[in-house]
Image: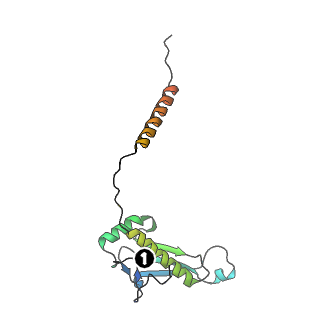
Amino acid sequence: MDKLASQSEEGDLLINKQVRIPRTELLYRFARAKGPGGQHVNKNEMAVELLFDLEHTSSLTEEERAQVKQRLASRLDSTGMLHLESQTERSQLRNRLDVTQRFIRLLRTALQPTKHRRPTRPTRNAIETRLKHKTRASRLKRLRQRRHHED
């Protein structure tokens, strides 16, 4: 996918047909990247952290916000801020593009409607296999029992 394919003319991020996130709602913080990399890494702030305030965004409806909060709960802090980091590239611009694309993909998947499971019956083979397993387990447990002999 093209790096700029998910951006509209105004600079908004296009998540899906209904949702646009203005770039003004995204906050980027920069830091020095961790790990090896020599002098270049030690002098320049190339690591990028994207912050998105899910609690106070005007881009999502209440239903969408609740769905995203439920699905991304492990990525949110206590104030409802979404944190994403990127430090894989040697350029701040590329890390910024990378973290923005990851944000778009993450929101897209979080906003997809859930498929409702259609209940199905187990196959005859599955039932037979389950019953065989139960019989084997029962036989094994019976063999483990102590026999009380009356002397």
The residue lying toward the viewer, choosing from 72 and 38, is: 72
Query: Residue 35, how many percent across, how many down?
Result: 64, 73
- Circle 1 residues within 10 Å: few <14, some 14–19, many ≥20: many
Q: Residue furthest right?
A: 38
Q: Quadrant of residue 59?
A: bottom left
Quadrant of the rendered structure where residue 61 is?
bottom left
Q: Which residue is mark 1?
A: 52
Left or right position of 37 against 82: right
Q: Position of residue 21 (x, y in %)?
A: 39, 80
Q: Residue at x 36, y 62 (%)?
A: 115
Q: Position of residue 42 (x, y in %)?
A: 65, 80
Residue 139, placed above or below residue 104: above
The answer to which quarter of the image holds residue 37 is bottom right
Residue at horizontal 49 percent and vertical 30 percent from the top: 141
Residue furthest to the front in view is 124
Give the residue furthest to the bottom.
Answer: 9
Instruction: Give coordinates of residue 86: x percent, y percent.
Output: 54, 75
Which residue extends farthest top?
151
- Out of 84 and 19, give the one closest to the viewer: 19
Q: Is residue 116 left or right of residue 86?
A: left
Q: Amino acid at mark 1?
A: Phe
